[in-house]
Image: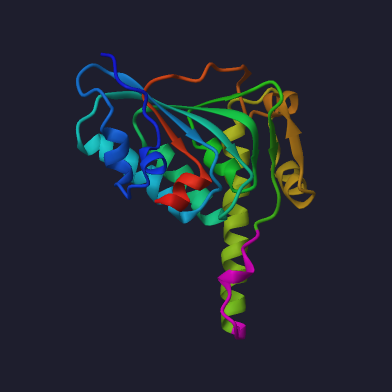
């Protein structure tokens, strides 16, 4: 069933439409179809909310999505949102595929590793590092208890990220990463270029995709700001 290309209409028209309504409006409702999403936004709570509500909205409307294909490029962002998106993607029964379109870094790494099939373009890279949070996360005046709470949250998220990387790369790796290797990589802010990403299981193949012309939602930082 032919449909009009799906674009971020809220940006084009300036209207504050619901993300799910904007996206669902141009989708077929009968035959199974692939939903494509270009995601070059920073990882944030808002991105988490938008993607989760969009996908859940499609499921609730009974749309026959056979696969979600994401084109991902992200320099990172909120580490908690990255882990949450990983868990959300792993809970989906629908096939999921992600392409690293250039760089996936920081909080973008656990998000990317949540996809069932993972592919990288020839010049892609992944960068991992210790968990950091924005200084604006702290109140103007901080007591010892609040500092300890933030330290516990950081340490816990660091551990979750390390576990995600080790577990999710193992099955696809030519040379599996050990716990010690992941810890060292995170401490040193390690970057894995395409060939190394393939070797260590971040991706299962290197391939240049052709961007879909239909059923595609564009999620960028500018789109999120406008909505």
Could you tell me residue 40's position as x and y percent?
55, 39
Magenta range is 132-144
Magenta span includes 159 = no
**Residue 178, quarter of picture:** top right
Q: Position of residue 226 (x, y in %)?
A: 43, 50
- Report the colour scheme: rainbow
Q: Residue at x 62, y 18 (%)?
A: 205
Q: Is residue 199 left or right of residue 136?
A: right
Q: Quadrant of residue 176?
A: top right
Q: Residue at x 21, y 38 (%)?
A: 60
Furthest residue to the top? 1
In the displayed structure image, the side of residue 13 where residue 165 appears, left or right? right
- 97 is higher (above) or lower (below) than 41: above
Left-right relation of 150 to 59: right
Q: Is the residue 183 above or below the residue 134 in the image?
A: above
The N terminus appears in which quarter of the rendering? top left
User: Between residues 165 and 62, which one lies in front from this camera angle?
Assistant: 62
Question: Which residue ends up furthest to the front in the rendered image?
Answer: 13
Find residue 23 and report its image quarter. Answer: top left
Residue 136 part of the magenta segment? yes
Above or below, comparing residue 114 to residue 201 in the picture: below
Our reading of the magenta stretch's main secondary structure is: loop
User: Residue 217's x, y, as percent?
Assistant: 41, 33
Q: Residue at x 51, y 49 (%)?
A: 83
Residue 114 image point, x, y percent: 50, 37
How many numbered circles does the render carry? 0
């Amino acid at each position: 069933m032919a449909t009009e290309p799906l674009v971020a209409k809220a940006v084009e028209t300036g209207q504050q439409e619901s993300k799910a309504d904007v996206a669902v409006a141009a989708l077929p409702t009968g035959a199974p179809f692939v939903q494509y999403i270009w995601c070059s936004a920073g990882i944030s709570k808002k991105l988490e909310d938008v993607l989760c509500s969009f996908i859940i909205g499609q499921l609730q409307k009974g749309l026959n999505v056979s696969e979600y294909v994401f084109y991902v490029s992200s320099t990172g962002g909120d580490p908690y949102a990255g882990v949450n998106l990983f868990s959300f993607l792993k809970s989906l029964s629908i096939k999921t595929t992600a392409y690293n379109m250039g760089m996936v870094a920081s909080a973008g790494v656990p998000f990317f590793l949540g996809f069932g099939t993972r592919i990288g373009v020839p010049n892609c890279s992944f960068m991992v590092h210790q968990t950091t949070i924005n200084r604006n996360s702290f109140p103007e005046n901080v007591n010892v208890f609040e500092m300890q709470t933030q330290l516990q949250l950081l340490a816990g998220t660091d551990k979750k990220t390390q576990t995600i990387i080790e577990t999710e790369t193992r099955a696809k790796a030519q040379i599996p990463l050990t716990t010690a290797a992941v810890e060292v990589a995170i401490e040193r802010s390690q970057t894995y270029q395409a060939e190394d990403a393939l070797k260590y299981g971040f991706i299962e193949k290197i391939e240049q995709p052709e961007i879909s012309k239909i059923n595609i939602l564009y999620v960028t930082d500018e789109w999120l700001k406008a909505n």
